[in-house]
Amino acid sequence: MERKEIIGKVLSVYGKTVVVAVTYSRSHPLYLKQIKKKTKIYAHDEQMLAKVGNVVRVVETRPLSKLKRWKIVEVLSGGES
């Protein structure tokens, strides 16, 4: 079974936990207009490489805490200087 992968932007960092915003678009059921939506996920960052503003790839994993179900695989770009 393949694990889900998502690309998102880091909103905040709390030690080894990062909050990642994932944006996606859905079609409105009646008007069929494309609507942008955003969700926040909590991810584990073992090496503590992610900074606020980075674009990261996260992968689904076993539950690590009450909210953490994802872990960071790769930091793609961006970040504060």
Image (tube, grey):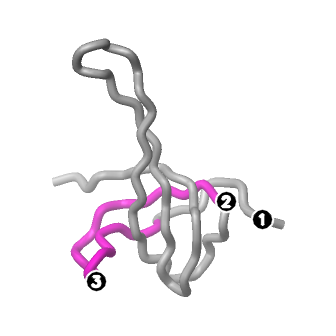
Query: N-terminal of the two: label 3 or label 2?
Result: 2
Query: N-terminal of the two: label 1 or label 2?
Result: 2
Say above or below: 20 vs 2: below
Give how far apart the Cα atoms at labels 3 and 1 are: 28 Å
Image quadrant holding the N terminus, namely bottom left
Disc number placed over residue 65 in the picture, else none: 3
Q: Position of residue 33 (x, y in %)?
A: 38, 16
Quadrant of res 32: top left
Q: Position of residue 81 (x, y in %)?
A: 84, 66
Left or right position of 11 against 21: right
In what element is the residue under mark 2?
loop
Residue contact between numbered discs 1 and 2, judged by CB atoms under 8 Å: yes
Q: Label 2: which residue?
A: 53
**What residue span does the magenta drawing correspond to?**
54-72
In what element is the residue under mark 1?
loop
Q: Position of residue 29 (x, y in %)?
A: 23, 20
Give how far apart the Cα atoms at labels 3 and 2 are: 24 Å
